[in-house]
Image: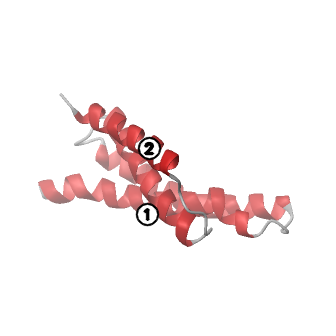
Amino acid sequence: MSPLVERALPVVLLLGSNVFMTFAWYGHLKYKASPLLVVILASWGIAFFEYALQVPANRWGSAVYSAPQLKGMQEVITLVVFAVFSTSYLGQSLKWNHWAGFALIAVAAWLIFMD
């Protein structure tokens, strides 16, 4: 595997994983009339695909990134995916304080990557 693919593949897998995770955790908010048990089972089904991407992302990513770096990267990816999801799927715009909080988390992730 080339060094570029080795570094990029975990990021791509984490991105895909977080799309599934976000739908599993928050997608049901558009269907509040659905029975909770149905929502839980559907979320578990969606989460399977999250794990199917997350586990290899961390396994293969650990060859080039430390565990804290993988976690920091995952948090930033989660926030980006959630921001898009919140505005486009749920129709809930983010306010300045949300962006400020997300920015602080991004700075924390950046610090993790510093030597």
Residue type beneath disc 2: Ala
In front of the other: label 1 or label 2?
Answer: 2
Mark closer to the chain start, 1 or 2: 1
Q: Which residue is mark 1?
A: 16
User: In percent of the image, x 31 and y 49: which residue is there?
Assistant: 60
Would you call the spot at circle 1 few (<14 residues within 10 Å), some (14-19), or many (20 or more)?
some
Residue type beneath disc 1: Gly
User: In percent of the image, x 51 and y 48: which residue is there?
Assistant: 98
Q: Is residue 40 left or right of residue 100?
A: right
Q: Quadrant of the N terminus?
A: bottom left
Q: Which residue is mark 2?
A: 100
**Secondary structure under the numbered disc 1 in the rendered image:** helix
Q: Quadrant of the C terminus?
A: top left
User: In percent of the image, x 58 and y 71: which residue is there?
Assistant: 89
The percent coordinates of residue 45 (x first, y second) are 66, 63
Q: CA distance from mark 1 to mark 2?
A: 25 Å
Q: Residue furthest top?
A: 115
From this view, report whether residue 86 is shown above or below residue 110.
below
Q: How many marks?
A: 2
The percent coordinates of residue 67 (x first, y second) are 35, 35
Q: Is residue 18 left or right of residue 30?
A: left
User: In percent of the image, x 36 and y 42: which residue is there?
Assistant: 106
Residue 48 seen in the figure: no
Q: Nearest the camera: 15 or 95?
A: 95
- Displayed quadrant of residue 48: bottom right
